[in-house]
Each structure stands twice: as C-alpha cells, then as structure tokens.
Image (cartoon, rainbow, N blue to C red):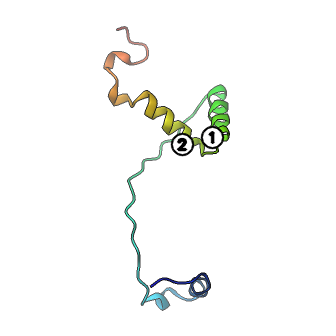
Amino acid sequence: MRLSREEALLLANEPVTAWANADVEYEPRSAVDVFQLRLGPADGMWVAREADRRCVNPSMVIEARRAVEGSPADQDASDEPGSEG
C-alpha cells in the first residue's frame, strides 16, 4: 500500500491503531558502530575544510581517510606508536 503525501499526513494525526491495514516495508541496513573522536584544533579544521571542499559530511572524510590508511587490524604490532621496530 503506497500512500500519497496527503494520505500520510492525515494518518500521522490519527492513533496508531488506525494503521492496522498498513503494510510495512523493511529495508536491510548495514550495522554501524559510532565512536566519539577527539581531534586537535589543526586536525579538526582540516577535516572541516576537507568536508566543505567535497560537499560531504565530516564523517565521510574520516571514513575515506581510514580506508586509505587501513584499519589498526591491518597493521603489524610493531607499527604501534612508541614501539621500536
């Protein structure tokens, strides 16, 4: 059952029980993890400028950078900061 915009707005004002005959369309979504990231002023400004230049969300810039550099699981243990190797 595909609703027009007007029908959807009318149903939005009715109780949920009025939706009993509506079909729910499910879309598969990939799992996403969210991590808080604290950047220094220079790195934060670089991400903001790069996101503006690309006309994308800053998280897209960070994801693209991570894809280029690889994930920590791709690096050898000797590549850790402060280790000699």
| Type of the residue with mark 1 | Arg
Image location (x, y in percent) of residue 35: 48, 42
Left or right: residue 52 compared with residue 4: right
Image location (x, y in percent) of residue 54: 63, 40
Q: Which mark is residue 69?
A: none
Which residue in the protein does label 1 denote?
54
Helix, strand or loop status at disc 1:
helix
In the image, residue 25 sits, relative to residue 38, either above or below, namely below
Tell me where residue 80 sits by quadrant.
top left
Q: Would you call the spot at circle 1 few (<14 residues within 10 Å), some (14-19), or many (20 or more)?
A: few
Tell me where residue 78 sits by quadrant.
top left
Q: Residue at x 43, y 17 (%)?
A: 81
Which residue is nearer to you in this view: 35 or 25?
A: 25
Task: Give the Cα distance between marks 2 and 1.
Answer: 9 Å
In the image, residue 79 sits, relative to residue 24, either above or below, namely above
Q: Residue at x 53, y 37 (%)?
A: 62
Which residue in the protein does label 2 denote?
60
Q: Residue at x 49, y 85 (%)?
A: 16
Contact check, label 2 and label 1, Cβ < 8 Å: yes
Q: Residue at x 59, y 41 (%)?
A: 58
Which quarter of the image is occupied by the C terminus?
top left
Q: Would you call the spot at circle 2 few (<14 residues within 10 Å), some (14-19), or many (20 or more)?
A: some
Q: How many marks?
A: 2
